[in-house]
Amino acid sequence: MAHTASLTDRMIRAARLDATLFEEVEADRDATQQAMLVVLLSSVAAGVGSFTEVGFSGLIGGAVVALAGWFLWALLTYWIGTSLLPEPQTQADLGQLLRTTGFSSSPGLLRVLGLVPGLWLVVMMGTSLWMLVAMVIAVRQALDYRGTWRAFGVCAIGWTIQMVFLLFIRGMTQGLLPAG
C-alpha cells in the first residue's frame, strides 16, 4: 500500500497530524519524491500568499526562502536529533527525516490564503504554528523518541539556528550587514 498511497491522501493525513502517516513515509523510500513535492508546493504557496504583501519579489523570494529554510531545518534537526540529543533507540538516516519533515509541510499549502486582503499575517502565523506541530510529530516518529518534548526541543533548536542563518543571509543580500 505504501507505494500506491496517493499524495493527496498523505498530505491530508499529515495535516491532520496522523502519527501513522509519518511512520509510513519514514519507511517508504519511494515517498522521498512525494515529500519533496509537498515542500515545493508549500513553498510556492508561501510565495503566492506573500504576493499581496511584498509583491513579485515575495512570490519568488517567499518560495525560495521557504524551500531553503525547510531543507536547512531538516538537516539541522537530523544532526541535532541523531548526534546531540538521541535516545538509546534512535536510529534514522537523513532520507527518513527528509520524508517525514517534508510531509509536515502539508499545512503550508494553505498559505495561498495570504492573498486574501487582511489575512496575510494570520494565515502565515497560523500555518507556521500548524507546520511546527506537524514537524514535532514527524521528528518524534522519525527519530523514534518516546516523548514529544525531546522532539520539540530538537525542532526548536534547529529552527532557531535556521532563523539566525536566514536572517543573516537576508541582511547580507539586502545590504544590511557588511560583506565581510
Image (spheres, rainbow, N blue to C red):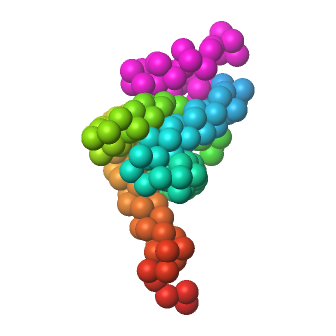
Give yes or no for residue 24 being in the magenta stretch.
Answer: yes
Image position of 44 (left or right of 95): left
In this rendering, is residue 102 above or below 83? above
Between 125 and 162, the one nearer to me in the picture: 125
Residue at horizontal 40%, vertical 38%?
A: 115
The residue lying at 27 percent from left, 41 percent from top is 118
Position in image of residue 65 (x %, y %): 53, 55
Instruction: Locate the C terminus by quadrant.
Output: bottom right
Looking at the picture, tell me which residue is in the foreground, 22 or 63: 63
Q: Up-down: is 56 above or below 124?
A: below
Task: Give the mark count.
Answer: 0
When the figure is inspected, residue 168 is found, relative to residue 65, above or below; the finding is: below
Q: Give the range drawn in magenta.
A: 1-27
Percent position of residue 66, x then y: 51, 49
Instruction: Name the residue nearer the viewer: 94 or 144.
Output: 94
- How far from the left and from the top, in percent, is residue 79? 54, 55
Question: What kind of secondary structure does the magenta stretch mostly adopt?
Answer: helix
Q: Which residue is drawn at 43% across and 68% down?
A: 167
Residue 44, quarter of picture? top right
What residue is drawn where x is 43% and y is 55%?
Answer: 54
Q: Is residue 166 left or right of residue 7?
A: left
Q: Is residue 140 above or below residue 15?
A: below
